[in-house]
Image (cartoon, rainbow, N blue to C red):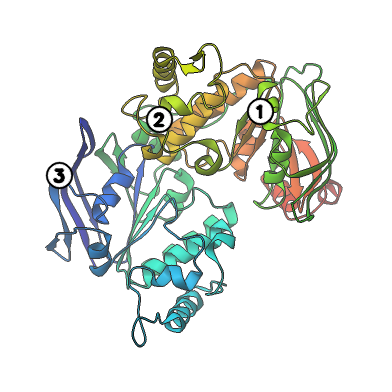
Amino acid sequence: MKLELRGITKRFGTLVANDHIDLVVEPGQIHALLGENGAGKSTLMNVLYGLYQADEGDILLDDVVQRFRGPGDAMNAGIGMVHQHFMLVPVFTVAENVMLGHEQTKGVGTLDIAKAREHVRAVAARFGFDIDPDAVVGDLPVGVQQRVEIIKALSRDAKVLVFDEPTAVLTPQETDELMAIMRQLRDEGTAIVFITHKLREVREVADTITIVRLGRIVGEASPTATNGELASLMVGRAVELTVKKDAPRLGEGGLAVSGLRVLTAAGAIVVDGVDFTVRPGEVLAVAGVQGNGQTELVEAIVGLAPRVEGSITLDGTELVGRSVRAILDAGVGFVPEDRTEDGLVAGFTVAENLILDRSADPEFSRGGTLRRAALDEFAHERIKEYDIRAQGPHTPAGTLSGGNQQKVVIAREMSRELRLLVAAQPTRGVDVGSIEFIHKRIIETRDAGIPVVVVSTELDEVAALADRIAVMYRGTIVGIVPGDTPRETLGLMMAGAAEGEVAA
């Protein structure tokens, strides 16, 4: 099925999110939409999917103009969408999620769950997915949840499939698997729209690339274009794709972790016997495949882990046993790996989110009442400094694009006096221009004599930022190596090979 968008325009008040956009996606083609956070990519696809109504323009399928009053109309016309933030009901099973919205019954008022299970198994077998139709979605890993989204879209016989930032929460291995699925769908004749801002992925999988900036199409490119060329088209300026940093100037003290064990509430050991130090003026990057204890390690440092044994000291002061509030007040900045769950309050404004951990400061509060003028001034400064694409400080944070939500979190944590910065997946879901900015701020924090812990599944990010790299595997650190260690060596360590074994 051929998809064509003609002159699509979408406004939100005075903000023009899409400005007369024309786009054609042919059957059997992967058409990448590349652009910064807030460029209008997701808005355009939400118009296509019937979630928004265009103010101007037409949607055509096989040259026939469509009028979608909602997602149901779009799905019935053969359009499927895999959302950046999954549209799944966590307490439902896989089969129940897949049938949601087009339920089939047997008899009077009885859902035909058996038929839904059969359909899940059929689509899963087609792509080699290992998915239990009766598994509760909330218990599944993120990568498997995304496969449920794909099955859900294909169950409606989608001929046009939209992937909206599908790799934002995936590991490198899951990303490679997803791109293989996209190629298989393309080869079967599906028209695919791939929304992303990751240059490597778009060059690897796209047949053609359209670049969107500030709501307008500013150019088209071939997958053979260089990263620099694509980045410049996205951002509208030259982008520094490598991190420039001097040799670290180490201070005394810093973070010291000794004999650390982290247990779940049920008593399972998820971090086992971890030891490391981070001196003032250096970045220690923690690398590893997602799910090997990195999350729990970070939670232990900031006081979120339920059961912790061992010692974590900051400049000689023990943190184990202290509350999260006390740890933050001790000067620990924390960028959580999941901004929507742990980093923001979606219903709060940008301004309110920028002072979540500082609302009692005299600068912003007096007599238990927020000083709104001071808060607005602070928010305006941070919005400008961190290039947060929002209509203003009173915009609800939940309405921002994923990358701009991340900028709010980064701005909050880096705008106060720090003695330690812990940043988990700091650029997840962030475009290349913002990655450049965030990386610079992390190095500036390090150069200011502050110890920095970065946890990332992106090896390019680890290599760019790290002075030393600690590799985690199954809850332990298999080795701590220099920041310039080759990717191949890191890959072997991430699979469980100890540092000495790799060297041998």
- Determine whether the residue tagged by mark 1 lies in a helix, strand or loop: helix
Residue 76 at x, y percent in the picture: 25, 69
Name above or below for residue 129 compared with residue 161: below
* Structural distance between the alpha carbons of marks 3 and 2: 26 Å
- Residue kind at label 3, given as amino acid type: Asp
* Structural distance between the alpha carbons of marks 1 and 2: 22 Å
Name above or below for residue 236 compared with residue 75: above
**Residue on which the image places disc 1:** 325
Q: Residue at x 56, y 15 (%)?
A: 361
Direction from residue 189 to residue 319 in the image, left or right: right
Taking the image as drawn, is residue 228 in sight? no
- Determine whether the residue tagged by mark 2 lies in a helix, strand or loop: loop
| For the residues bearing labels 1 and 2, Cβ distance under 8 angstroms | no
* Structural distance between the alpha carbons of marks 1 and 3: 47 Å
The residue nearer to you, when weighing 68 against 464, is 68
The numbered dot on residue 55 is: 3
Q: Earlier in the sequence, mark 1 or mark 2?
A: 1
**Quadrant position of the N terminus in the picture:** bottom left
Residue 97 at x, y percent in the picture: 44, 67
**Residue on which the image places disc 2:** 349
Q: Residue at x 62, y 31 (%)?
A: 334
Residue 99 at x, y percent in the picture: 39, 72
- Residue kind at label 1, given as amino acid type: Arg
Q: Nearer the viewer, mark 1 or mark 3?
A: 1
- Residue kind at label 2, given as amino acid type: Thr
The residue nearer to you, when weighing 379 against 287, is 379
